Image (cartoon, grey):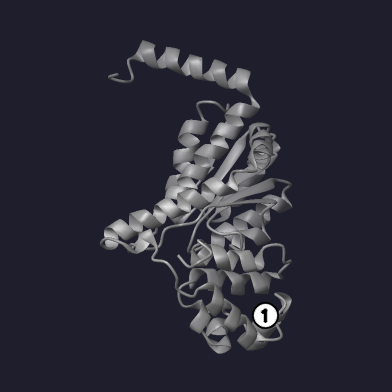
């Protein structure tokens, strides 16, 4: 870490905090966050190519952040990522560094949860949705299933949406017809196109979209009413989803807290059934 004590990703996110960016500018911001280690050394043309935008868009992005052009923004990026004290996450071998990085992701998530009221409101919203559709496609599918497995013990009707295609729209419409008011979506890199299509369709049919995603500048922000960010680990061949999984369980806790009497009754009924059927060894 440098003298500020914050990781490069956090310092970059601070640049965008409170600035209203266009969808194109959010793509650029997301690209810089993803390339946090090298962002300060990329040219405007390289940033444009990585983000899939035009070079003038990068210049306008820099000006939206209060700089007179991209060179000034790049100087600011270099200041933010300048080396200082050694980061404990840099110690050890590659596997240890990956785990340390996940610990950092969890620390940042803990900081975000200081506003417990926001999570409580999300819990009330999702608890009131009967049924509760839970979307997770491709890499996000296991996380949606993990959440839904436990949520089904305290919520009367949880519906996992883990297949794309035209049937997904049918299932969204069926959920709304059955009384659903909200959708919980897990949106993780590499952001499947079909996930974005599903979020658009969910809002079109009247669902309030809550998205658990990896960054406040994720593409999901264009299509969600509530965005809950939790960073994804990128130090191994495949992404680590420790922080998003933790956040999923935090959201489930908020659902339980929103309906304590019903939650307790359902948990007791499950335990009684599990005992009668001898489901578990212990």
Q: Is residue 217 visible?
A: yes
Tally of marks = 1
Q: Is residue 207 above or below residue 40?
A: above
From the top left corner, tell me how far across and down residue 282 is, in percent. 29, 18
Q: Secondary structure under badge 1?
A: helix
Q: Out of 219 and 178, give the one closest to the viewer.
A: 219
Residue drawn 49% across and 83% down? 41
Q: Is residue 217 above or below residue 226?
A: below
Q: Is residue 25 above or below residue 18?
A: below
Residue drawn 60% across and 71% down? 29
Residue drawn 58% across and 83% down? 75
From the top left corner, tell me how far across and down residue 268 is, in percent. 49, 15
Q: Quadrant of the N terminus?
A: bottom left
Residue drawn 33% across and 19% down? 279
Crowd around label 1: few <14 · some 14–19 · many ≥20 (10 Å): many
- Position of residue 73 in the picture relative to residue 235 (left or right): right
Q: Out of 189 and 28, give the one closest to the viewer.
A: 28
Residue at the outermost left position: 93
Q: Which residue is mark 1?
A: 62
- Position of residue 120 in the picture relative to residue 35 (left or right): right
From the top left corner, tell me how far across and down residue 76 is, in percent. 60, 78
From the top left corner, tell me how far across and down residue 109 is, in percent. 53, 49
Q: Quadrant of residue 180?
A: top right
- Position of residue 274 in the picture relative to residue 186 (left or right): left
Q: Out of 80 and 249, give the one closest to the viewer.
A: 80
Q: Is residue 135 visible?
A: no
Q: Is residue 191 above or below residue 280?
A: below
């Amino acid at each position: 870490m440098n003298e500020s004590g914050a990781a490069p990703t956090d310092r970059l996110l601070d640049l965008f905090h409170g600035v209203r960016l266009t969808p194109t500018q959010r793509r650029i911001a997301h690209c810089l966050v993803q390339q946090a280690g090298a962002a300060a050394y990329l040219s405007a043309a390289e940033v444009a190519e990585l983000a899939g935008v035009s070079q003038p868009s990068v210049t306008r992005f820099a000006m939206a952040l209060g700089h007179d052009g991209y060179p000034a923004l790049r100087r600011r990026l270099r200041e933010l990522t300048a080396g200082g004290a050694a980061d404990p996450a840099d110690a050890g071998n590659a596997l240890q560094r990956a785990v340390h990085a996940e610990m950092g992701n969890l620390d940042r998530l803990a900081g975000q949860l200081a506003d417990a009221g926001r999570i409580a409101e999300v819990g009330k919203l999702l608890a009131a949705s009967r049924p509760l559709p839970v979307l997770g496609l491709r890499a996000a599918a296991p996380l949606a299933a993990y959440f839904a497995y436990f949520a089904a013990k305290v919520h009367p009707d949880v519906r996992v949406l883990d297949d794309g295609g035209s049937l997904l729209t049918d299932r969204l419409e069926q959920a709304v017809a059955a009384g659903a008011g909200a959708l919980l979506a897990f949106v993780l890199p590499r952001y499947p196109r079909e996930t974005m299509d599903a979020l658009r369709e969910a809002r079109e049919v009247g669902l309030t979209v809550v998205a658990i995603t990896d960054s406040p500048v994720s593409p999901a922000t264009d299509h969600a009413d509530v965005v809950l960010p939790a960073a994804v680990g990128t130090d191994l061949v495949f992404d680590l989803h420790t922080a998003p999984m933790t956040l999923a369980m935090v959201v489930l806790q908020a659902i339980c807290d929103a309906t304590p009497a019903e939650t307790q009754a359902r948990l007791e009924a499950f335990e009684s059934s599990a005992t009668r059927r001898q489901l578990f060894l212990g």
